[in-house]
Image (spheres, grey):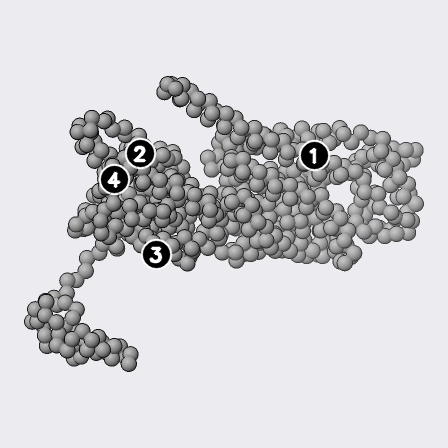
Amino acid sequence: MSRASKENRGFSWKGLRLREMGINKIAILALIVGLSAVLFFPSLTFFGFNYKPGDVAIMDIKSPVAVTSGELSLKKGEIVVRDGQIVTETDIRKFGLIEESLKQKKLIIPMTGFLIFTAIFMGISYFFAAKNIRKFSTLPKDILLMAVVFMGVLVLMRFSDVAALIMKEFFPAVPTSVYKFLIPVAAGPMLVRLLLNSETALVFTAATSIIVGFFMGGSLDMAAYTLIGGVTAAMGVRHCTHRSIVIKAGLMVGAVNSLTLVSIAFIKGGATFSEPFFLVFAGLINGLITAVLAVGIAPMLETAFQYTTNIKLLELSRMDHPLLKELAMRAPGTYHHSIVIGTLVEAAAESIHANPLLARVSAYYHDIGKLKMPQYFIENISDENRHDKLAPSMSALVLICHVKEGVELARQNRLGSEITDVISQHHGTSLISYFYQKAKSMEEPTGRTVNEEEFRYHGPKPQTKEAGLVMLADAIEAASKTIPDPTPDKIQWLTQKIVNKIFSDGQLDECELTLKDLHLITKSFNRVFAGVYHQRISYPEPAYILKEDGIEGAGQDRPRDEKPAGGDKEDGRDRLKRLGVQ
């Protein structure tokens, strides 16, 4: 097959995959719209309560339709009976008229209208966010997650009336209108922020608040309350590194909810002393329920969708993780190299407002693929160099394979997509220059032309700031070991040289690092290296001159090769005595 035909075939397959991704997203959006309409349909019906004349109404009952029959006339949205009012014969007749009108009325019309509205609203919101908000999550998995959370919110709204009736039985003194503000709608934005990002959570909150307002009978109050609470919840868990932060965010949501409800009550006027008290209480309880619900559901969604939250990253950062323990035992050089890189990228991530925790933990695991053949990597070589017996192309293949093997180990151990992506991207498509140059030097004797592509990693290039940081730190830390006398000036020159080389090679073209970021990263790396390679005071005498009488004493002029009198065993026994060990 010719090269042109291969390229055409590759392009068509890529286009097909992109089309499939687009179809998946459209299917998920259609599913959201359809399920929203199905859940909205019951809210159009009238809940006929089995009241008898003389009963006391346990909640406000509004007419969902306009109806006129003889002397009785009701407007759409008009309250038939209020909470606590005694039901009369006339009220019972009104209930019957409403139910009869609903049976005759074609509810398919408002349901169709809501279906069309939701389709337009969701479609416009998604396409605007995808085109204009750079960090908005557009993967099918992310859209599916938002769909699941959104459906959960609508189910809660759907059964809010039933919950209000149950709560009214236990707390008859609380106005029924307060119960709707207990629904933890803010748990949706909180979960989206925990698993995705702030930009996506903001779009999700805006879309959810409008639909929730429709579910509550076109309530502007509920829409505003949901929007403010959702934004507060997403903001509260922005840097969630402990589960206690979710609880604190819930308390913050509760406080903001209370202020919002009281302000709405005052805007509408006529608020008594008792009503703001109940509203404040409802807002606080809502925040606590939101936090508890998010803490309980987040681990399930995290496992089901293979996301890596900051809480999961903290668990992976423990040095007793099986992969890190195995790396320390089988490839100690790689383990130390990874720890140093973790320190470098964490400091650099803080300087450019990336995720320091994700950068550090990704650095710990970025070279786990070397566990398969640790002796073929220079930091683990102690005796003979096994590459001396291999052709340069084979040596390059061994190095390239550690990326693929690292990705497989990450998936087997469920490290999460974020860390797995960094592992696959931390070399990008860079050239393995040492073995490439070695192959070029052997080109003339063998008569074989060296193909540069065989000596490049397969990529992809770094797609995030964290992946770009790991790539830069990996190359600089490895190169710093080759400097015989690492002074700050030499380290600074080396750092700048490697950053420029990686940048000019185009390895950072697809990530979000700017020139300003690269400048800050270089400064941060130099600061860390200054601490790692700091100069020490040169001691005038070797350590074996330590005697019973102190650090300085007899024997200062003893030759370097001469052992102290008494032998090794006696000397060791004396040291133990000085430490208090018998």
Q: CA distance from mark 2 to mark 3?
A: 29 Å
Closer to us: mark 4 or mark 3?
4
Q: What amino acid type should be assigned to the residue bearing mark 4?
A: Leu
Q: CA distance from mark 2 to mark 1?
A: 52 Å
CB atoms of marks 1 and 3 within 8 Å: no
Q: What amino acid type should be assigned to the residue bearing mark 3?
A: Met
Label 1 CA crowd tier, 10 Å (few <14, some 14–19, many 20+): many
Is 524 on the left or on the right of 411, as rendered? left
Q: Which residue is mark 3?
A: 329
Q: Which residue is mark 2?
A: 456
Q: What amino acid type should be assigned to the residue bearing mark 1?
A: Ala
Closer to us: mark 4 or mark 1?
4
Closer to us: mark 2 or mark 3?
3
Residue visible at 81% across and 40% down in the picture: 46
Q: Nearer the viewer, residue 131 or 450?
A: 450
Look at the image and tell me in which quarter the C terminus lies: bottom left
Residue visible at 16% across and 80% down in the picture: 549
Is 127 on the left or on the right of 269, as rendered? left
Q: Percent from the top left, x then y, of residue 30? A: 63, 31
Closer to us: mark 2 or mark 4?
4
Residue visible at 68% across and 57% down in the picture: 277
Query: Which comes sooner in the sequence, label 4 or label 3?
Result: 3
Q: Which residue is mark 4?
A: 390
